[in-house]
Image (cartoon, rainbow, N blue to C red):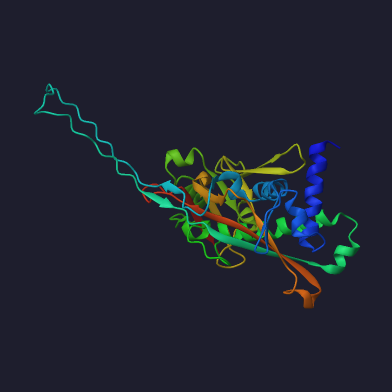
Amino acid sequence: MTTTMKNKKEIRTAFTNYLLGNTSAMEVRTLGVDVNNGKATIPKSVAEEIIGYVEQENLLRKYGKVVTVDGNLGYPVLTGDTKVEVGVDSKERDDENEVEVNHLGLTAELLDPVEFASISTIKKKLLKMTPISVSDLIIDVMKKEYLKKEMDYMFNGADTFNPGSLLNKAKVFTPTQTEPVAIIKELKNKPSTSVANKSRWIVNKAALEYVEDLKLPNGDPALKTIDRVDGGVSYMLIGFPLDCTDVVKGSVDTAAVFYFGDFSSFTIQENSTGLEVSTMYETYSRRNEIGFKLYNLLDGKLIYSEVEPTVYRLEIK
């Protein structure tokens, strides 16, 4: 084991021991862990593991834009369209006949980071019985619970209201066609050319089932599957990549929900100082559990100009 790997393992073990009350704050501070007012800054190597897992599983982190900012200052995202008029004049310019200056009007939307928290709990009995390392167990539980909370915030904005979530901000598409294939093709043709060139689908399971047997006029399947080297499959729907996730919600559980567009317009801001965590010893003691509250200063919004929506939403009940 290299020195770096050994050091990371020591930090990881000391950090989780601190969360369980087995190591003092003074001891973990010697390893570079900042402890303040009951919160501990998660060590960089552990934070990278948590965020790395979230980046892999959260499609909006995977396809969106992530910016890291110091403190809670709002990150500006330009949204306004500029109208540039170029005039040609054959007159010779002099002091009385100056070239007119064009002014570009830009508007921006500010991200508004909030303290975002997820709570995970572990049975005390399990901590004593587990065959895997306690460090692995605690970090695995924290990252999975945080992932669920973050994905719901960005996709649906339900538990923690988010006006910029996909559900709340994507442009609602109302089809004029009635045939299933025609509806999907109409949605596919809705974005502008510049948006369509970078577009893909994100759908729920009901939507995947809706399109899996559809045929194009030439007899080809609308949905094609591509075998991956890792043993899984990838999807293409009418020529565009498709991802399916259970986090996409409709107004009813059986609704087929389609998002189509350029998801790089979904912007995520988080704090450069990283993640923090506190242990909740008393809150869940009656259930014989220990709780861990993980904090991140975060915002995630779909941002676009009304002149050119970047993501459309279709729900079929």
- The image position of residue 16, as x and y in percent, is 78, 57
What residue is drawn where x is 63% and y is 53%? Answer: 208
Q: What x and y, as percent, mark residue 285?
A: 78, 75
List x then y, in percent, for residue 246: 65, 58
Residue 62, image quadrant: top right
Question: Which quadrant of the view contains residue 129?
Answer: bottom right
Residue 114, above or below 222:
below
Instruction: Report the number of discs.
Output: 0
* Residue farthest left in this picture: 96
The C terminus appears in which quarter of the rendering?
Answer: bottom right
Q: Identify the residue at horizontal 30%, vertical 44% (top origin).
A: 105
Residue at 71% x, 43% y is 233
Can you see residue 119?
yes
Residue 42 versus residue 198 in the image, above or below: below
Q: Residue at x 66, y 50 (%)?
A: 54
Q: Residue furthest bottom?
A: 286
* Viewer-proximal residue among 81 and 285: 285
